[in-house]
Amino acid sequence: MSSSEPTTVGALHEVQRPSTPVTRVLRPGTWATALAALDDHPGARPVAGGTDLLLDLARSSGPPVTLVDLSAIAGARDITETSDELVLAGGVTHNQVVADPRFRRDALPLAQACLEIGSPQLRNRATIAGNLATASPANDSISALMALDATIVLSRLVGGEVTTRDVAVGDFFTGFRATVRDRFELITAIRVPKLRAGRRGMWVKLGLRRAQAISVVHAAMVLDLAPVDDDSAPVVRAARLAVGSVAATVVSVPAFADALVGGPLDADRIAAAADAVAELITPIDDVRATADYRIAVTRTMIGRALRTLAADAADAQWPADPPMLGSRRLPSAPPRADIDDADVIEVTLNGSPASGSGAAGSTLLDWLREHASTACAGVKEGCAEGECGACTVQLDGAAVMSCLVSAAQADGGEIVTVEGLADADGLHPLQDAFIDDFAVQCGFCIPGFLVAGAALLEECPAPTDAQISLGLSGNLCRCTGYYPIAQAIRTASDEPT
Ligand SMILES: Cc1cc2nc3c(=O)[nH]c(=O)nc-3n(C[C@H](O)[C@H](O)[C@H](O)COP(=O)(O)OP(=O)(O)OC[C@H]3O[C@@H](n4cnc5c(N)ncnc54)[C@H](O)[C@@H]3O)c2cc1C
Ligand code: FES
Ligand code: FES
């Protein structure tokens, strides 16, 4: 069909709906079988949360690929600790870090970075390992992990045995979106030294809005401060700074330490350190900011962060009980190991069994609307890029953007869509509140708000205004009906106002 010919009703023109070019999804249950799958399938790509990879594939014109899904690996989401380190397995998500108080206490810069990534729905899927492997200089966890001097554990199979090598995060990146990892290796763990004994750290970001914002600049710093007996400023024994979105990779800036180490953390030294950093970075102009603006704002951000650390107030901005919109549970049954497009996947959809083929090449959004035996047209496609929240569903107890999940990754899972909120007794209390508070205009965004809002109320039965704003930060309303939407959440809460 030529591009000038009209499409028939129901059929989309090829430019309207690029399908996800995936023919097969392998779902290993162990790191060893995942590594073997990479060895056995040339061109196969590992996928964790899929929040970067699925979009990259949808935008690419390359041949269809096989995915090796890491999300069903036993232990992939484990977080363990030693006396000196927090150890994240290769599938730990950003929301797991936000929810775990050990990070706020012992690795605050990483907790702060994870809290600022995307939206709650995104953070329920997106992993730290994926953030590192994508290797964009704008990726927020990288500056935090560099300042904390974390180590990446890369594993591969040699002679059938899993062997590992340790790479300092600072040595992992070789250029824009390029790393030392070869295609047969996986990030199986990230070791993060704890901030103890005089060490203080924090992470800061400037984005063009408060959620879902790629960093204009992000930076993390860790200082080692000698104790002082009186009210004088503490003396800096060591300092590390990493800055992102100002070069092809996130960069560490040794001049920061040169300006600070050996003296007190006072106003003069803080100004000198901020100036030294601003003089050394060489950002580019792009759609988000000019180079000059980035330099000026970096100076301001570094100065403010140092003053905050001097006052020992780095976690003062941490919100009280940030909502996660669910914490992901692993399915108890072992996953089906190999799914191609002809295979039928089975899920529990709104409490009843549902099935359908087409899962390998579909996002969960498309599968629910077009392939599931019980079609769910209530799940809306607003952007298909994780930006708007219209496609929000609950998967295994956590709200997710269904446009960013491979449907094959949902096999065996439990899914709740807007169609599942009402029960035999009537509408969900939040649906009643949306009607009573006139929270609906054109209605397109509402299914996503309802599913996200229901997850929020499950987690925080009487949410504060701050929790409502954070919990719904992944949902956009083009009709801008945010005030009545927030009011409907309050009305449906345990303490209506
Ligand atoms: C709407 C939206 C908003 C976003 N906002 C932010 C933001 O504010 N800040 C930010 O930093 N990022 C942001 N991102 C980017 C993205 O969510 C993160 O980079 C995420 O952490 C990637 O993790 P993932 O598990 O989804 O990776 P995937 O998409 O599954 O994989 C990404 C890459 O990593 C590889 N990979 C995954 N796991 C491993 C592993 N264990 N070993 C080796 N390779 C692996 C994959 O092969 C792929 O190349 C945003 C993305 C979207 C769509
Ligand atoms: S976030 Fe999925 S359609 Fe917009
Ligand atoms: S009510 Fe129209 S987009 Fe939200």
Image: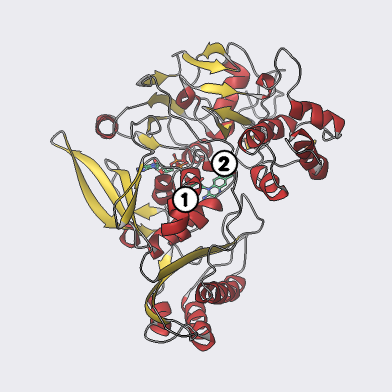
Vertical comparison of 368 with 111: above or below: above
Do we see residue 136 in this rendering? no
**In-front residue for pair 120/28:** 120
> As drawn, which residue projects farthest toward the front?
229
Vertical comparison of 229 with 147: above or below: below
Q: Which quarter shows the N terminus?
A: top right
Indicate the position of residue 307 as horizontal and vertical percent values: 55, 76
Q: Is residue 395 left or right of residue 409?
A: right
Disc 1 residue type?
Answer: Pro
- Callout 2–callout 1 Cβ contact below 8 Å: no
Read off the residue under disc 2: 324
The quarter of the picture where residue 27 lies is top left
The residue lying at 73 percent from left, 35 percent from top is 494
Q: Which quarter shows the C terminus?
A: top right
| Callout 2 secondary element | loop
Indicate the position of residue 484 as horizontal and vertical percent values: 83, 40
The tag earlier along the polypeptide, 2 or 1, is 1
Disc 2 or disc 1, which is closer to the eye?
1
Indicate the position of residue 202 as horizontal and vertical percent values: 49, 65
